[in-house]
Amino acid sequence: MCEGGIPTLTAGLPPGGRLLDVGCGTGALVQAARDAGCEAVAVELDLEMAALAGERLGTEVTVASLPDLPFADDGFDTVVASFVLNHVEDPRAGARELVRLAAPGGSVRATIWTSAPTVQGALFREVMEASEAVEPVYPRLDESLDFERSLDGLGQLFAAAGASVTDSRMVDWVWRVSPEDFWAGVTGGVGGVGVAWAAQTPDVQDRMRVELDRLAEPLMDHGEMVFPATAAYVEARVPRS
């Protein structure tokens, strides 16, 4: 799903520039940046995902996480965080770290999921209700650490970190996913749906899988569920010394 933001995050990169992808996932964005002529470096927290990305890219992936990344100040022309700031324990410190790593005159580019309702979220809510699933306790950040999950909120994060927002917009694409891959994300603990699934008994988990197949039928097209996806995108420029 997150790969739908890659064209926006990699558009107009400076040829030959150095790019850091923080939270590289499968390595798809790093590969796109390299294809565009950049020297791209990958960082990933999850060991299994880092190994997968390293195999895909044919290079070592640094295992680290925000807000403590093992790179010198001002080392990259572009620093990218694709759907990372949604998940870190201290988003404000994370934004400051991204800005620290960008060279003067360089940029930080980030996408986040906003708090707006989604079609897939509504579907999963129906699945939970039909399965008589219990409502879990979702983890929440302390208010002093959190930020507004919106386009303005993302821009304010980088402004507070000392960068100037130069581009701020919502980005839309279509996400196509098989029910099997969708469910793999749920059982893999991805986001709030993963938290909800893990809180259920095995019997309820089994019912949830059955209900997903039933309720997703109106969304199916050639064996895949089709969802509209929307994310907030911000590019911020680091001041020249």
Image (spheres, rainbow, N blue to C red):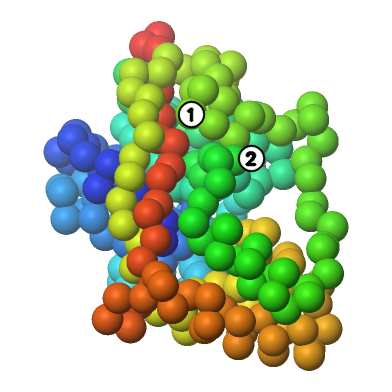
Residue 122, horizontal then vertical, whole percent? 57, 58
Q: Residue at x 27, y 81 (%)?
A: 222
**What's the residue type where badge 1 is placed?**
Leu
17 on left or right of 68: left
Residue 151: mark in rendering: 1
Q: At 47% across and 84% down in the image, what residue appears?
A: 180
Is residue 134 among what the camera can see?
A: yes
Mark 2 or mark 1, which is nearer to you?
A: 1
- Residue bearing mark 2: 67
Name the quadrant containing residue 195.
Answer: bottom right
Badge 1 marks a residue whose secondary structure is: helix
Q: Is residue 163 left or right of residue 104?
A: right
Q: Spot the residue most to the top.
A: 241
Pick whichever, 81 or 231, lies toward us. Answer: 231
Please state, as top left, top right, bottom left or bottom right, where the C terminus lies in the image: top left
Q: Residue at x 64, y 36 (%)?
A: 91
Report, in whole angstroms, how far the alpha carbon at label 2 lies from the one at label 1. Answer: 21 Å
Pick the residue in front: 164 or 8: 8
Residue 191 in percent (x, y) is at 63, 59
Q: Quadrant of residue 146?
A: top right
Relative horizontal placement of residue 30, taking residue 38 as reference (left or right): right
Q: Are marks 2 and 1 in contact (CB under 8 Å)?
A: no
Q: Amino acid at mark 2?
A: Pro
Using the rendered image of the protein, determine whether residue 188 is visible from the camera's viewpoint.
Answer: no
